[in-house]
Image: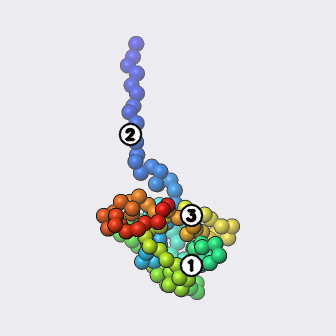
Amino acid sequence: MGTVWEECLRPNRFWGRQQELCISLNRRGEIALGGKTWLALGRPGYAVLRFDREGRRIGLRFVAGGTPNAFPIRPLGEGDAKVIRARRLLKQFGIEVPITLRFDPKEEKDGSWILDLTTASVPKKVTHHYRNRRRSIPPG
């Protein structure tokens, strides 16, 4: 009778994060796109930013360069992560972001992506950061 080997499974602690789109907005107005998100979206170079005051939602429509009101998508760090510097969006529409928010983006029929401020959450990495321990952090 031969030996039957069973392989030990090594859990990948980042598995869940890699499978979903990762978009966040910090208090400086930087919309961060995770590297896998940017690749999944087709490596866009520019985005038009919109805001729905009634629904408290931000809309991202990825466009080609030269489109009016398009914000460039720039590198963030050394990986594939990208950032849209959207301070103007926060100022123009009076959006207050006291702490970094993480979104579960939804795609619309027209191809734009919706970031809902009412359902955004605060990542654990942010709530446990030493600078944020004394701050009043909204639930989420």
How crowded pointer 3 is (Cα within 10 Å; few <14, some 14-19, many 20+) is rated as: few
Please state which of the two labelled residues, at mark 2 or mark 1, is closer to the viewer: 1
Q: What scheme was used to colour the molecule? A: rainbow
Dot 1 lies on which element?
A: strand
Q: Which mark is residue 49?
A: 1
Please state which of the two labelled residues, at mark 3 or mark 1, is closer to the viewer: 3
In the rendered image, residue 85, in percent from the top left (x then y), is placed at 45, 79
Find residue 32 and report its image quarter.
bottom left
Residue matched to label 3: 119
Find residue 58 and report its image quarter.
bottom right
- Along the line of sight, which residue is nearer the eye, 42 or 12? 12
Q: Quadrant of the N terminus?
A: top left
Res 120 visible: yes
In the rendered image, residue 95, in percent from the top left (x then y), is placed at 52, 78
Indicate which disc, 2 or 1, sits on the residue closer to the N terminus.
Answer: 2
Q: Is residue 63 above or below residue 68?
A: above
Residue matched to label 2: 10
Please state which of the two labelled residues, at mark 2 or mark 3, is closer to the viewer: 3
| Residue at x-position 48% and y-position 62% | 139
In the rendered image, residue 46, in percent from the top left (x then y), is placed at 52, 77
| Residue at x-position 55% and y-position 61% | 104
Indicate which disc, 3 or 1, sits on the residue closer to the N terminus.
Answer: 1
Res 78 visible: no
Dot 3 lies on which element?
A: loop
